[in-house]
């Protein structure tokens, strides 16, 4: 009997040890009653917006431009490229090509060499020339002022449309979702989606419309200056107390 008791005790210990070592089942992401990320509580969102305003009251688009058309071209060139590099190229580009007509009838091989430093220069040349021709032929030489119309331009998707409409015209058509906004929105638990279109829809539900334009600029500035992809500067972040991202460095 004593031997059986010892065996049962040993078996219980092994079972208990195995349970402790077994991986815990992954927790489901918390969402609110209508399926949004749990971090979208109105008070928390308001606190995030207040912190961003405190840190970046003068945040704006960092692509240098003198008019909506130049901003459109620079935004197309900024795909997979830094604003700093685009601004360097733009210094001479807009002197040689001052308007839509100059771009529309440019020599493709020459334009490719001008914008080569921004990367993907062949596709960008086609987009810029195509957009310029469309602006001349269908919009009287002016960049359109609605999302529906601007999306008909070659090389223009919602991100570019939101940049131009918001920055050049002050039109709140949506929220710019670039790599910084995508990364930070997830870190701050404002979305659980990966697709930029779905992320934009999530943000538009929780960010007050009057804040859409400035929110984009501020989040982009924060991503460039503090909340880096690999090594976020959490000790310098005024949002640290509101953030519970798994990859925090503090």
Image: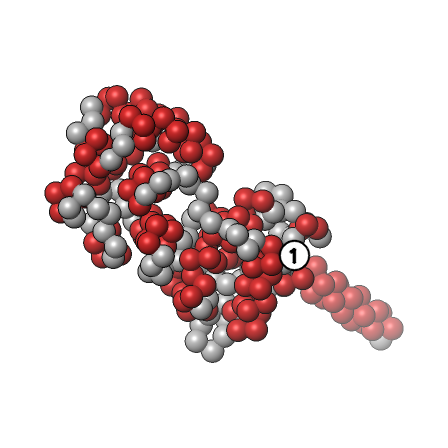
Name the spot of residue 44 as percent of width and height, x first: 57, 69
Q: How many tags in the picture?
A: 1
The residue positioned 23% from the left and 32% from the top of the image is: 103
The residue that label 1 is drawn on is 238
Quadrant containing the N terminus in the rendered view: bottom right
Query: How has the structure been colored for display?
Result: secondary structure
Structural crowding at the residue carrying mark 1, measured as other residues with C-alpha within 10 Å and reported as few (<14), some (14–19) or many (≥20) = some
The residue positioned 54% from the left and 68% from the top of the image is: 45
> Is 228 on the left-hand or right-hand side of 213?
right
The residue positioned 31% from the left and 51% from the top of the image is: 161
> Is 95 on the left-hand or right-hand side of 211?
left
- Residue 3 location, quadrant: bottom right
Name the spot of residue 95 as percent of width and height, x first: 32, 28
> Is 226 on the left-hand or right-hand side of 86?
right
- Toward the left, the furthest residue is 137
Q: In the rendered image of this protein, does residue 124 appear above or below residue 219? A: above
Between residue 2 and residue 120, name the one nearer to us.
120
For mark 1, give the secondary structure.
loop
- Toward the bottom, the furthest residue is 33
Name the spot of residue 206 as percent of width and height, x first: 46, 69
Between residue 96 and residue 154, name the one nearer to us.
96
The residue positioned 42% from the left and 57% from the top of the image is: 213
Name the spot of residue 209 as percent of width and height, x first: 41, 67
Residue 203 seen in the current view: no
Q: In the rendered image of this protein, does residue 49 appear above or below residue 136? A: below
Residue 133 seen in the current view: yes
- Toward the right, the furthest residue is 2
């Amino acid at each position: 009997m004593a031997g059986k008791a010892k065996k049962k005790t040993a078996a219980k210990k092994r079972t208990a040890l195995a349970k402790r070592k077994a991986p815990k089942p992954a927790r489901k992401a918390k969402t609110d009653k209508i399926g949004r990320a749990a971090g979208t509580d109105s008070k928390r969102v308001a606190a995030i917006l207040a912190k961003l305003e405190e840190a970046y009251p003068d945040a704006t688009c960092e692509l240098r431009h003198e008019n909506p058309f130049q901003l459109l071209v620079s935004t197309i060139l900024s795909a997979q490229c830094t604003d700093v590099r685009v601004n360097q190229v733009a210094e001479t580009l807009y002197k040689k090509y001052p308007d839509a007509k100059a771009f529309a009838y440019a020599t493709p091989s020459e334009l490719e060499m001008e914008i080569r430093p921004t990367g993907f220069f062949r596709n960008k040349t086609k987009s810029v020339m195509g957009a310029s021709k469309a602006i001349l032929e269908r919009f009287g030489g002016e960049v359109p002022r609605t999302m529906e119309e601007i999306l008909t331009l070659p090389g223009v998707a919602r991100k570019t449309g939101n940049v131009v409409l918001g920055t050049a015209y002050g039109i709140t058509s949506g929220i710019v979702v670039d790599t910084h906004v995508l990364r930070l929105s997830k870190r701050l638990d404002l979305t659980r989606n990966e697709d930029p279109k779905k992320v934009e829809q999530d943000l538009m539900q929780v960010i007050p419309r009057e804040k859409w334009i400035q929110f984009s600029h501020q989040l982009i500035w924060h991503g460039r200056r503090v909340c880096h992809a690999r090594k976020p500067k959490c000790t310098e972040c005024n949002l640290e107390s509101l953030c519970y991202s798994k990859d925090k460095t503090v």
